[in-house]
Amino acid sequence: MTEDISSPEDDRPMKPAMWRGLRRRCPNCGEGGLMASYLKVRDRCESCGEALYHHRADDGPAYLTILVVGHLMAPLLHVAFVQFRPDPLVMAGLFTVGCVALSLYLLPRLKGLVVAIQWARRMHGFGGTA
């Protein structure tokens, strides 16, 4: 028989943490900013003092960004080509700008999401025991 060692006050719900991470807010309180700059995660939340330096996002946010941008832009590329038949240079220019803009918008948000998931699941030192 396994014993549940978590208590209700230690519960870290996943969905609110994920939404806070997507908004680049502290996964604990949702008030303080998660990022110190574009992709640099703060060491501690400025509002509640939660330690955030434990995160190990690494390349995960970049891979997620590529996945999302590719799945959004590839069908749009196909529809634009089939419906409108623009000049290849115009199409390449528009979709290059679109992919770069969407990537720059999504990357810090997906990094916040990854950090929030790690916080909610007590990964990489977020458990408080390490």
Image (spheres, rainbow, N blue to C red):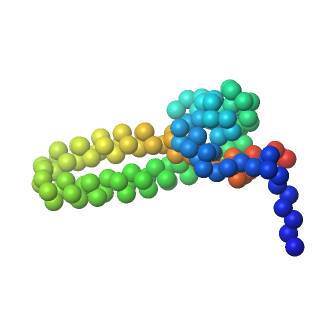
Residue located farthest toward the top when viewing the structure as drawn: 46
Q: Quadrant of residue 76?
A: bottom left
Q: Quadrant of residue 79?
A: bottom left
The number of callouts visible is 0
Q: In the image shown, does 90 or 118 lie closer to the viewer?
A: 118
The image shows residue 13 at horizontal and vertical percentages of 67, 50
Residue 124 seen in the current view: no
Residue located farthest toward the front when viewing the structure as drawn: 8
* Quadrant, the N terminus: bottom right
Q: In the image shown, does 2 or 79 lie closer to the viewer?
A: 2
Q: Residue at x 14, y 57 (%)?
A: 83
Q: Quadrant of residue 35?
A: top right
Using residue 88 as the reference point, say whether residue 58 is left or right of it.
right
Using residue 70 as the reference point, say whether residue 6 is left or right of it.
right
Residue 102 seen in the current view: yes
Q: In the image shown, does 121 or 93 lie closer to the viewer?
A: 121
Q: Residue at x 27, y 47 (%)?
A: 95
Q: Residue at x 69, y 27 (%)?
A: 47
The image shows residue 56 at horizontal and vertical percentages of 66, 47
The image shows residue 6 at horizontal and vertical percentages of 82, 55
Using residue 39 as the reference point, say whether residue 54 is left or right of it.
right
The image shows residue 88 at horizontal and vertical percentages of 16, 51
Q: Residue at x 36, y 39 (%)?
A: 101
